[in-house]
Amino acid sequence: MIKRIINIIVVLLFIYIVVGVLLYFIQDRFLLHPKKLKKQYRFAITVPHQELNIPVNQEDTINIMKFLPASNKPRGVVLYFHGNRENIEHYVKYTNRFTSRGYEVWMEDYPGFGKSTGDISEKKLYDQARQIRTLAASRFCNDSVIIYGKSFGTGIAAYTARLQPAKILVLETPYYSIPSLFGHYAFMYPAEVMSNYSIPTYLFIQNLKTPIIIFHGTNDEVIPLSQASRLKEMLKPGDRFIEIENGRHNNLVSFPVYGQVMDSVLSL
């Protein structure tokens, strides 16, 4: 009987180790779902836009799409850090709310996404965000810059908000940190040790002077509401945490409360 129990424990331990090793080496496949595009690819985008390619070194290039309002004198710029899927083309549908109200929208692709080249890493994500924020500062004053993060991009947006003050930081379906999110799904493993990425959103928004608005749905099937709720204690008076009843991961923009809040921000 004892020998049988020991054998069972050994088998379970073996499975635990094998699955853990497998998760460690394929974690990027769970976290990131890029769609690469050739340099000569022409985006199927009908709204007015400009494409910008910034060479970083011989391997790395940042591809940025600037979506333009009708006015030649934009009210400001939205630095939009998109989610973990495909590339810029997948997120174009979210830009009209901003351009129709006179804002430019600058959307980058992360390394390995779309036409942006190079291997992705947390450091490169930060370096790329820093370059874009510096570029925006050369054209727009701080109170004309809105920093917007969606899903995976919320952590990068929060980091960007620490670089310079901005009009507002908007986080749509944020996570506490990547290890915390991994830990939700693989709670039996030491996520802090195993994760290739940290991206501590909670740390970036601590003592942040820029106003913050967070949107999260109660039925988010990708990033649980509990992840975003942990960020509440980092918010300062005047910041807003908007919990959208029945909201899911990708449909918050369809709820009236989202439109009302964002319209009020864009009208200021």
Image (spheres, rainbow, N blue to C red):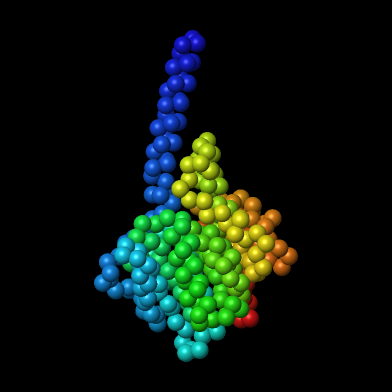
Q: Residue furthest right?
A: 237
Left or right relative to 184: residue 268: right
Q: Position of residue 230 (x, y in %)?
A: 64, 52
Which residue is depicted at the point 44% across and 71% down? 107
Above or below for 175 versus 162 = above
Left or right relative to 243: residue 58: left
Above or below for 49 versus 18 = below
Which residue is depicted at the point 49% across and 67% down? 130
Q: Position of residue 234 (x, y in %)?
A: 67, 57
Q: Residue furthest bottom?
A: 72
The quadrant in which residue 206 appears is: bottom right
140 or 252, nearer to the observer: 140
Above or below for 265 versus 188 = below
Above or below for 74 versus 134 = below
Q: Residue furthest top?
A: 1
Q: Is residue 110 visible?
A: yes
Which residue is depicted at the point 37% across and 76% down? 52
- Image quadrant holding the C terminus, namely bottom right
Which residue is depicted at the point 57% across and 57% down? 201
Q: Position of residue 77 (x, y in %)?
A: 52, 78
Q: Is residue 256 visible?
A: no
> How many callouts does the rendering have?
0
Q: Position of residue 108 (x, y in %)?
A: 42, 69
